[in-house]
Image (cartoon, rainbow, N blue to C red):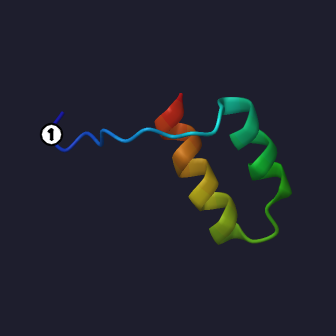
C-alpha cells in the first residue's frame, strides 16, 4: 500500500478509547478516532 504513514503515537489504545468517550464534538471524536485506528 502506497503512502502508509509512519508516525509514532504516544498514547496507548486504552487512553485513546477514553479520550474518544470524552469528546463533545464530532470533529474531536473523529480526530481521536483516526489516531486510534492508526494505533491498532
Q: Report crowding for label 1: few under 14, some 14 to 19, many 20 or more residues within 10 A (C-alpha).
A: few
Quadrant of the drawing holding the N terminus: top left
Whole-percent x and y of residue 30? Answer: 60, 59
Q: Residue furthest top?
A: 40
Hey, which quadrant is residue 23 in on the image? bottom right
Whether residue 25 sits left or right of residue 35 in the image: it is right
Question: How many discs mark residues in the rendered view?
Answer: 1
- Return the residue nearer the eye: 8 or 26: 8
**Residue at horizontal 74%, vertical 38%?**
15
Q: Is disc 1 placed on a helix, strand or loop?
A: loop
Residue 39 vertical position relative to residue 7 in the rendered view, above or below: above
Q: Where does the image place residue 37, in percent across and percent down from the top left?
A: 53, 39
Q: Is residue 40 left or right of residue 21?
A: left
Above or below, 10 relative to 30: above
- The quarter of the picture where residue 36 lies is top right
Q: Residue furthest front?
A: 10
Q: Which residue is mark 1?
A: 2
Q: Is residue 37 left or right of residue 29?
A: left
Residue drawn where x is 52% and y is 33% of the image: 39
Q: Toward which corner of the image does residue 13 lie, by quadrant?
A: top right
Residue 33 pos. (x, y %):
61, 49
The residue at the point 68 percent across, 59 percent down is 29
* Left/right of residue 36 with respect to residue 7 in the rendered view: right
Amino acid at each position: 500500500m502506497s503512502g502508509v504513514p509512519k508516525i509514532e503515537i504516544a498514547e496507548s489504545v486504552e487512553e485513546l478509547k477514553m479520550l474518544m468517550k470524552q469528546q463533545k464534538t464530532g470533529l474531536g471524536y473523529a480526530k481521536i478516532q483516526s489516531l486510534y485506528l492508526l494505533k491498532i
